[in-house]
Image (tube, grey):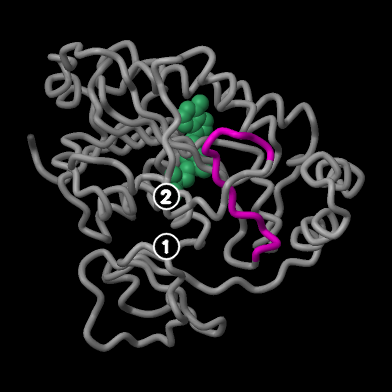
Amino acid sequence: MSKLLTKLSLKLWSDPQQQQAFVQSLTDPQPLHPCIAWVAEPLDEIPFQRITPLPWQLPFVDRLALDERPGKHFLHQQGVYYCLDFSSVFAATTLTPIDPRPKIVLDLCAAPGGKSLLAWRLLQPHLLISNEVIGKRVGMLISSLKRCQIRPVWVLSADPAILADNIPISADVVLVDAPCTGQSLLAKGESAPGCFHPVAIQHNARRQRRILANASQLVVPGGYLAYMTCTFSDAENERVCTWFTRRFPSFVPQTVAPLLGFQSHLTDMPCYRMWPQSGLGAGAFTMLFRNTQKAKSRSPDLNSWLDNNYRWCSDQL
Ligand code: SAM
């Protein structure tokens, strides 16, 4: 593993100090500040010690002192907040330029539900559709959404290709928090077997391209597509974006002002990265596109398709 990690660090960084810092953040992970997203307004009296927010931090997010354990507090079980890595907040910040308020947000890769919650909280869509293709992960998605009383939300479990075929042109915002090699798990002290292996990287890059191609069919003209991963290899991130912009030129890269300080040095496109050596979070990549196609009518079949295929919903349509 360490040879492949060293090789990746040489590819990502020309500066030896950065190479070393990157490798060290993954081989000798340091504690990260716990982070919570408030589902409603923060309580008047917060039972945790918070640390000073960063200038771009979403207003309903708090980072906490290192020794806080918000996941063990009864307020967590009551769904008052959701615990997540700060990298997820970083990735979701890519949604901030989205305007106007979307009718429908479709989260294509949703379990366990962190990005669905952040998108719902930030964009306040008229309807959230959370999709998780892997059947055994749907339960945890539903339980997060129920616990935090997210509504209105419909949960699906379909391959993105099925959705593209059956309900094309249906969402104002499509979120692709793509399955990836998960290299950032190492920065949390977790394991990610094979995450630096070229075969695994290529497999994930291909899968991400397939998901993005299907996602592009789901976005209404003028709508947005947000792509994000929690891994570092450029083959899964910048190079997937390069492929996507060539293959789908009507999807135009969008600048995300709050993330300008996180511009990826590996491309000129507005791709943003949180590196693990920043100490802010385990690490993430994100990019936002806008569909500039001319008006086409929305899928007329959305409601009936949802009715026949949903796994769980908070309220009937
Ligand atoms: N968005 C989630 C969150 O913030 O809590 C994390 C999503 S995780 C990075 C990627 C998800 O994509 C996993 O739940 C995985 O089961 C799902 N997935 C795997 N293969 C997929 C595919 N071919 N199409 C869509 N999603 C897939």
Q: Is residue 89 magenta?
A: no
Give the residues drawn in magenta, as a range: 266-278
277 shown above or below 33: above
Task: Locate residue 222: give its quadrant.
Answer: top left
106 shown above or below 88: above
The answer to whether residue 231 is left or right of residue 38 is right
Q: Mark 1: is the Cβ under 8 angstroms from ligand 1?
A: no
Q: Report x, y in % for residue 116.
A: 33, 47
192 shown above or below 168: below
Q: Report x, y in % for residue 82.
A: 36, 64
Residue 204's tag is: none
Q: Which residue is mark 2?
A: 257
Callout 1, which amino acid? Trp
Residue 255 seen in render? yes
Task: Locate residue 169: give its quadrant.
Answer: top left
Q: Which residue is mark 1?
A: 56
Q: Mark 2: is the Cβ under 8 angstroms from ligand 1?
A: no
The answer to whether residue 277 is left or right of residue 41 is right
Residue 140 seen in render? no
Q: Report x, y in % for residue 145.
A: 28, 52
The answer to whether residue 136 is left or right of residue 18 is left
Q: Secondary structure at mark 2?
A: helix
The answer to whether residue 315 is left or right of residue 9 is left
